[in-house]
Image: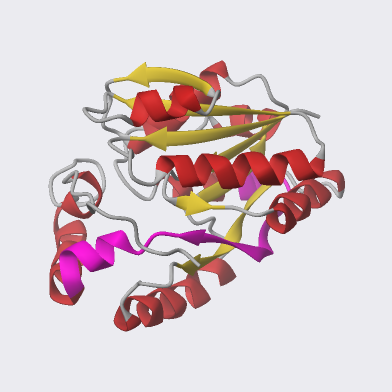
Amino acid sequence: MTTSYIIPAFNEELLLEDTLISLKEACTQLEIPFEIIVVNDNSTDQTEAIALKNEVKVITVDLHNIAGVRNAGADIATGDLLCFIDADTLVNQNTLQAMHTAIKEGIIGGGAKLQMDANTPRWGKFWTWWFTQIYFRLKFAAGCYVFATRDAFDKAGGFDDTYFAAEEVFLSKKLKKLGPFKILSQSVTTSGRKMRLHGRWQTIKHIFSIMRYGLNSRKGLDLWYDGQRETSKQSKK
């Protein structure tokens, strides 16, 4: 079984290389056939060059819709298993091994637990912990790490690109209707940059904007689509 790892990326020159290195190392240790696809969403920085330097497949789109970007990667993927990883997320061998074991046991899709990087504000770590206690019990995959068999993904219709956020929730719901769905106890490490950049009260304001405007438009979704990026790396350990 070949696994296709799909990484959507918009202006991710700062963090993409670390993500690719960690992923390639973990995949190599597993000795399971794989391909890595970076879907460059018309970046204006060195995202494409960094992906090419790391010898992965690269396609460029101009969508600015995360569901559509993920689907574009799936469209060219050749794997029997699809795994979607955010460009600011580090994975390890244990998590990938647990995913493959779950697939062998009949699981058709799922996600992994998550840890925020070391420099995430304390309030952000607490909020994430509290939110994910509910989120994972409902068996929703976190957007930074979602996997599904090719067959199940196609039957589910892929990510619904009428939504500009929470696309992983809607896919999780569809997959759960098709077969066994699992949130792995193993975790990935994802960046807390949004919390560092926006701060506590601005983040709360964004949440209320989502409640006001919904998920079918980029309006009110600046937390994801404003394009702000840090200028130096923060430790993810």
Q: Is residue 139 above or below residue 52?
A: below
Name the residue rendered at 48%, 52% in the picture: 89
Name the residue rendered at 28%, 36% in the picture: 11
Q: Is residue 224 above or below residue 56?
A: below
Percent across and percent down for residue 6 are: 53, 33
- Disc tally is 0
Please name the colour scheme applied to the rendered image: secondary structure
In this image, 208 relative to 48: left or right?
A: left
Name the residue rendered at 67%, 29% in the picture: 150
Q: Is residue 121 above or below residue 221?
A: below
- Dividing the picture into quadrants, the one containing residue 67 is top left
Q: Is residue 160 visible?
A: no
Specify the segment rendered in magenta. 175-199
In this orientation, which residue lies closer to the viewer: 21 or 85?
Answer: 21
- Dividing the picture into quadrants, the one containing residue 113 is bottom right
In this image, 9 relative to 92: left or right?
A: left
Percent across and percent down for residue 181 are: 68, 53
